[in-house]
Image (cartoon, rainbow, N blue to C red):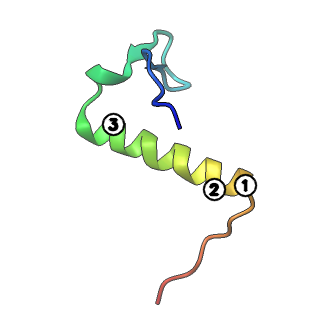
Amino acid sequence: MKKITGILFVREESETEYRRWDTLTKEEAERISNFINQEAAIASGFRKVATA
């Protein structure tokens, strides 16, 4: 699989300007990454498993 290259821009719904991914704080990038992974899992049919 080829490595994806390019520049990613993101913005929150409340923002009007896009920001570069590489200028986000570590916490922001981690939060967005987790959200994207969750949405991808839902879209592909995975279900969350409750942990005890």
The residue where tag 2 is placed is 41
The vertical placement of 20 against 34, above or below, is above
Q: Tag on residue 44?
A: 1
Q: Which mark lies nearer to you, 3 or 1?
A: 1
**How far apart in space, not on screen, are marks 3 and 1 (Cα)?**
24 Å
Question: Mark 1 and 2 residues: CB-CB less than 8 Å, in contact?
Answer: yes
Query: SS of the residue at dot 3?
Result: helix
Earlier along the polypeptide chain: callout 3 or callout 2?
3
Q: What residue lies at 48% left-to-right and 18% top-to-bottom? A: 15
Q: Position of residue 2 (x, y in %)?
A: 50, 31
Q: Secondary structure at mark 2?
A: helix
* Residue at the (54%, 43%) spot, across then down: 36
Q: Residues within 10 Å of mark 3 (few under 14, many from 20)?
A: few
Amino acid found under the numbered disc labelled 3: Glu
**Residue toward you, 42 or 1:** 1
Q: Residue furthest top?
A: 17
Q: Where residue 28 sits in the image (x, y, percent)?
A: 33, 37
Asked whether the residues under the numbered discs 3 and 1 touch, taking CB atoms below 8 Å apart as contact, a structural biologist would say: no
Count how many numbered circles sit on residues in the image: 3
Of residues 17 and 32, the one drawn nearer to the viewer in this rendering = 32
User: Which of the 4 image quadrants contains residue 30?
Assistant: top left
Which of the labelled discs sits on residue 28, or is there none? 3
Task: Using the numbered discs, state the Cα–Cα distance from disc 1 to disc 2 in whole angstroms.
Answer: 5 Å
